[in-house]
Amino acid sequence: MAVLQRYRMLVIVYVIVLGIGTREYLISRSGGTLEWISGCQASASGCSMTGRGTTGLADDSLFWTRHAKMTEVVAELNPEDPDTDFLLGMQALSEGDVEESIYRLEEALEVDPKHNNYLLQYYAQYELSRGADWRRVNRAVNRWRINHPFSADPLTIPLGAGPATPQDENEMYEALEAIPWVAGSQLESFILEDQPRWQISLVFQPGETVDVREAIEAVTLLSLPPNDRQHFRVRCSTLVDCTMVPR
Amino acid sequence: MFKTGYILSRRADLVWFLGLPFVAVLIALGFQRWLPYVAVASINLWITIPHHYAGWIRSYGMPQVWERFRERLIVGPFLILILTGAGLVWAPITLLLLVTAWDHQHSVMQQHGLSRVYDFKARAGLPSTGRFDITLHFVLYGFMFVHAPMFRFLWIREMHRMDIPVSAGFVEGLLIASWVVLIMYLAIYAWHIRQTISSGQPINPIKYVFIGASYFLWYFVAWNTNSILLYAVAHRIMHGVQYIVMVYSFMRRTADAPAAKPGFWSRLVGQGKLRWFLVGGVAYAFLFQLLINYPLDEFGFGVVNFAPYPAIPQFNLPALDYEASYGLFSQMMVYAYGMMHYYLDSFIWKVRDKQVQAGL
C-alpha cells in the first residue's frame, strides 16, 4: 500500500492509459474508425485538386464522411470559429462541392488565423492550382510559409507536358534548385482520365520569400528547344505570361 | 479578517504573480498582431523548455531532494518511458490525450500550489481551505474547458476520434450542467469563506487577487477563437516564468539555511549567479533542440532565420535543406573540436618551456 501511495500519480496515469488505450487498440485493430491524422487533415498536398493520388482522395472522402457528425456538432456550437469553417470546407470538398469548399476556406481566412497549417497550405495550393493572379498566389503561399516556415509539406504545380528526355528533367531540376526558396523538387506522373499527367512537387526553404513565378519560369524552360536553353531563359510576368529572354 | 502575505515580497509578487498574467496577455496580443505562428515555438524554447530545466535542477540537483525521493527519481523516468513507448506503438491517440490532459492538470495544480503558498505565508484560512481551494480551481478551469470555444472544439474532436460521437444536444446539456456546478460551488465557497471568518481565521486577499489574475489570463485567451497562438503564448509565459521564479527563489532561500547541502544547485544561486542559471536554461533548450533535430531558427520568433546555406547559382550550388544543414552543422562541431585540439597543442607542448620541461 505504501508503494501505491508513493506512486499514486503514476498509478492513476497508468490506469487511465490502460483503460482508454486498450479501447483505442481494440477499435483500431478491428478496422474501426480510430485514426491518426491523415489525408487532407494532415496535408493539403495529400488532397490537392490537381488530381494526384486517387487513393488519398478516397481516404479523405472516407475520413470526412466518418467525421461529418463531428463537423455538424462543431458547426452548431462554434459557428464563428475559423477551424469550423475549415472543417466545413474540407467536408464540402469531400462531397465534390469545390465552390462551397473555397467559400468556407475564405470565410475562415477572413479573421487571419495563423495557427492552422492545413488551412493556409490548402488555400495556397488551391490558388496555385486554379491559376489565380500571381499576386494572390504569392500572398497565399507566403502567408503559409511565414507562419509555418518549417512545415515540410510540399505544394504542387501542374505541368502542361512532362520532360521528354532525362536531360530535360535534369535541366528542370537544376533550374529549380537555383531558386533560393526551393529546398527540393520532385517530378511526379500519374494517369487522369486515361491521360498521362505531370506535376512538380516543391518543398520550401524557411525564411525565404516565395515568388511562384520563379518556379513557373524554371518548369517552362522545357518549352524551349534544348539548344536554346544555354542562350535564353524564361521570364514570367504572371503565372501564364512567359517570354524567352537572352541570358 | 484580512491578513496579507506574499510569496516573495510585495514588489516581486506584483511583478511575477499578480501583474505577469496581464503583461503576458498583452505580449500575446502583440504576438498575434505582429508575429507569425512559429513564434509559439520560440516561446516554447525560451520559456517552456528552460522551465523544465529549472525543474530538473530542483529535483535532481539538490542533494536533500535527491536523498529524500531517490527511489521515485530513479523509477519514475523508467515508468514514464515505458508508458510513452507503449503508447506510441499501441495507442498513440491515447498517449496524446494523456499528455494534453496531464498538462492541463499540471497547470491547475501550479496555480493551486501558489495560492496555497499565499495562505501559508499569511497563516490564513482553515485546515480545510486547501481542499476547498483545489475544488475551486478545478471547477473554474473545468468550466472554461467545457465552455470556451477553443477548448470545446478540441474535446469534441477528440471524443469523435475516440469513437464517442457526442451530439450537439449532449454538449448543450453539459454546458447547462457546468453552469449549475459553477454557481453551486461558488455558493459553497462563499460559505467556506464565511466559516473561516466566523472561526476567527484571517483571509489573505492577495491570494484571491492572484487567482483572479490567473483566471483572467486563461478566460481571456480561451474565448479567443481566431488563433491558438494567443493562448499558447500567454499561458506559457505565465506558467513558465512563474515556475522559474519560484524555483530560483526556493533555491536562494534554501541556500541561506544552515542545514543546506551544497550541490550543483548551490553553484547557481548567490550574488551575480542568476545570469548563469538563466544561461543554463537557454543552453538546455539549445541542446534539447539539437537532440530532437529541430531547427535552431525556432529561437528566432519567425523574424530571425539562421538558415545560412542558400543556393549559390554562380557556383552551381543548390540550397541545403534542413537535413543537409543539420548534417553540415554536426560535422562543423566535430571540426571545431578538432581545431580546438590543434590550437591548444600549438602552445601547451613547447619543449623549450621550462614548465613543460619539468613535467617531461
Image: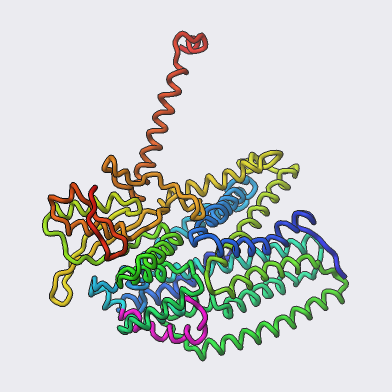
- How does the figure colour the protein chain or chains? rainbow
Relative image position of residue B53 (x, y in whole percent): 56, 50
Relative image position of residue B340 (x, y in whole percent): 44, 28
Q: Give the side of residue B100 with respect to residue A170, left or right.
A: right
Q: Quadrant of the N terminus of chain B?
A: bottom right
The residue sitting at 24% across, 55% down in the picture is A234
The residue sitting at 49% across, 50% down in the picture is B304
Q: Give the side of residue A79 with respect to residue B86, left or right.
A: right
Q: Give the side of residue A218 with respect to residue B166, left or right.
A: left
Relative image position of residue B98 (x, y in whole percent): 49, 69
Please tell me which residue lies in front, A147 or B348.
Answer: A147
Q: Answer whether residue A185 is magenta in the image.
A: no
Q: Is residue B55 placed above or below B2 in the rendered structure?
A: above
Name which quarter of the figure residue A94 lies in: bottom left
The residue sitting at 43% across, 19% down in the picture is B346
Residue A197 visible in the shown view? yes
Name which quarter of the figure residue A55 lies in: bottom left
Q: Answer whether residue A72 is magenta in the image.
A: yes
Q: Is residue B44 placed above or below A52 in the rendered structure?
A: above
Q: Which residues are magenta?
A: A61-83
Please tell me which residue lies in front, B345 or A141.
Answer: A141
Relative image position of residue B246 (x, y in whole percent): 68, 54
Residue B82 visible in the shown view? no
Q: Name the magenta segment's main secondary structure.
A: helix
Please tell me which residue lies in front, B136 or A160.
Answer: A160
